[in-house]
Image (cartoon, rainbow, N blue to C red):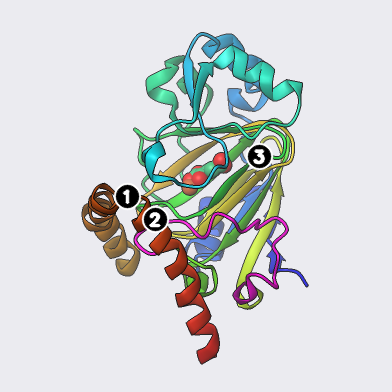
C-alpha cells in the first residue's frame, strides 16, 4: 500500500493571469519549469558558486534527530564553514541541512541574481530564505507558522516534494501545539500498518530539478527529500484566506509562546505527551470514519 498522492501539474511557463486563475484562486499547487531562465541565478547558482561567494560564512546545520527538550528549540545541531559544508555535500550522503538562511542578510551579492516575480501576490521582500540538503536528507513534514503562499525555486540536483492541504491534517498525526507531524513517519516510504490513518490522506507529489519553481498554496503541509545534494530559495506572500490568516496570527502570538512555556515547565514530559496525543487524536478520528 502506498500514500494517495497525485502528480503536481507542470507548466513550461505561466502568465500572471493564468497563474491566478488556474492555481492561486483555487489554491492548487503547480510546478513552473522554465520561469526563471532570464534570472542570472539560472545559469550561475550552483553549489560551487555558493562556495565561491559564501565559503567563509559559518552556517547552522540541522539533521533529522527528533525534537528533544535538552537540545533546545531550533538550536542548530552543528556549525561549519559554508566551504566545508559544500565539500561535505559533494562527498556523499549526509543528513545535514541548512534550514531558513536569510540570503539578503548573509550574502548580499546574491540579491542581484534574482527578481521578485509578479504573480499578482505581494511578496515579502525581506524574507528570501535558502535551504540546503545532502543526498538522502529530508525536511520533516510541516507547515509554515504564517501559513504563507510559498514559491520554492530549486537549484542543482533533484528534490522530491510531498504536499498536503490543511484539509488532510486530521490524517497526518499532527503534533498538537506545533507545526509538525510525528517525526518518526518517513513520508517518502511510510509504514502504513503503523500509521494507518495516512491511507485516507490525499496529497500531491513532484520532483524538482534545477530552475523549476513549485507554488505551495497557503498553509499546505510540505515534506522535502533531497534526492541529490542541492539547494532552494523560498519567496513568500502572506496568507489571504481569513481562516489561514487567523491561524497565522494565533500561531505566532499564542501557540508558539504557550508551547515554549510548557517546554520550560514540563520539559521532555511535554514533548512526550504531545507525541502520544498526536497518535491518540488521529486514531480517534479514524474510528469515527
Ligand atoms: O526545502 C526545504 O528544505 C524546506 C523548505 C521549506 O520548508 C519552505 O520553503 O518553507
Ligand atoms: Fe516550510
Residue 74 visible in rendering: no
Q: Tell me, for residue 271, which label it has, or none.
A: 2
Image-quadrant location for residue 90:
top right
Q: Is residue 142 above or below residue 131?
A: below
Tags 1 and 2 in contact by the CB under 8 Å rule?
yes
User: Picture coordinates of residue 165 (x, y %)?
Assistant: 51, 66
What residue do we see at 49% from left, 40% from top? Answer: 234
Q: CA distance from mark 1 to mark 2?
A: 7 Å
Answer with left or right where residue 263 lies relative to residue 210.
left
Say which residue appears at 65% left-offset and 39% top-offset: 137
User: How far is mark 2 from mark 3, CA to CA?
Assistant: 24 Å
The answer for how far apart the CA atoms under marks 3 and 1 are is 28 Å
User: In which quadrant of the rendered view does residue 129 lie?
Assistant: top left
Identify the residue at horizontal 21%, vertical 53% (top origin). Answer: 253
Question: Which residue was labeled with disc 1?
Answer: 267
Query: From the image, which quarter does the C terminus lie in?
Result: bottom right
Residue 58: x %, y % from top left: 47, 15
- For numbered disc 3, what is the local secondary structure? loop
Nearer the camera: disc 2 or disc 3: 2
* Magenta residue span: 176-198
Asked whether 193 falls inside the magenta stretch, the response is: yes
Residue identified by numbered label 3:
137
Question: In what quadrant of the picture does the N terminus appear?
Answer: bottom right
Amino acid at each position: 500500500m502506498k500514500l494517495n498522492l497525485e502528480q503536481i501539474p507542470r507548466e513550461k511557463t505561466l502568465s500572471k493571469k493564468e497563474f491566478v486563475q488556474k492555481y492561486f484562486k483555487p489554491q492548487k499547487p503547480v510546478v513552473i519549469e522554465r520561469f526563471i531562465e532570464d534570472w542570472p541565478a539560472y545559469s550561475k547558482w550552483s553549489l560551487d558558486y555558493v562556495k565561491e561567494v559564501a565559503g567563509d560564512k559559518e552556517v547552522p546545520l540541522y539533521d533529522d534527530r527528533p525534537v528533544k527538550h535538552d537540545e533546545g528549540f531550533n538550536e542548530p545541531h552543528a556549525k561549519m564553514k559554508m566551504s566545508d559544508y559544500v565539500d561535505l555535500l559533494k562527498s556523499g550522503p549526509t543528513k545535514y541541512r541548512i534550514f531558513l538562511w536569510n540570503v539578503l542578510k548573509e550574502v548580499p551579492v546574491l540579491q542581484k541574481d534574482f527578481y521578485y516575480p509578479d504573480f499578482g501576490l505581494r511578496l515579502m521582500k525581506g524574507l528570501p530564505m535558502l535551504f540546503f540538503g545532502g543526498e538522502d536528507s529530508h525536511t520533516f513534514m510541516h507547515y509554515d507558522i504564517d501559513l504563507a503562499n510559498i514559491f520554492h525555486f530549486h537549484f542543482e540536483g533533484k528534490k522530491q516534494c510531498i504536499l498536503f492541504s490543511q484539509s488532510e491534517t486530521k490524517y497526518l498525526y499532527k503534533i498538537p501545539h506545533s507545526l509538525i507531524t510525528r517525526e518518526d513517519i518517513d513520508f517518502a516510504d511510510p509504514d502504513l500498518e503503523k500509521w494507518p490513518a495516512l491511507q485516507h490522506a490525499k496529497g500531491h507529489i513532484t520532483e524538482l530539478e534545477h530552475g523549476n519553481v513549485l507554488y505551495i498554496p497557503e498553509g499546505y503541509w510540505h515534506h522535502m527529500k533531497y534526492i541529490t545534494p542541492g539547494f532552494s530559495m523560498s519567496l513568500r506572500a502572506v496568507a489571504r484566506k481569513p481562516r489561514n490568516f487567523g491561524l497565522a496570527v494565533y500561531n505566532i502570538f499564542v501557540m508558539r509562546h504557550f508551547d515554549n512555556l510548557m517546554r520550560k515547565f514540563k520539559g521532555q514530559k511535554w514533548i512526550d505527551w504531545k507525541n502520544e496525543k498526536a497518535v491518540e487524536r488521529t486514531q480517534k478520528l479514524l474510528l469515527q470514519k
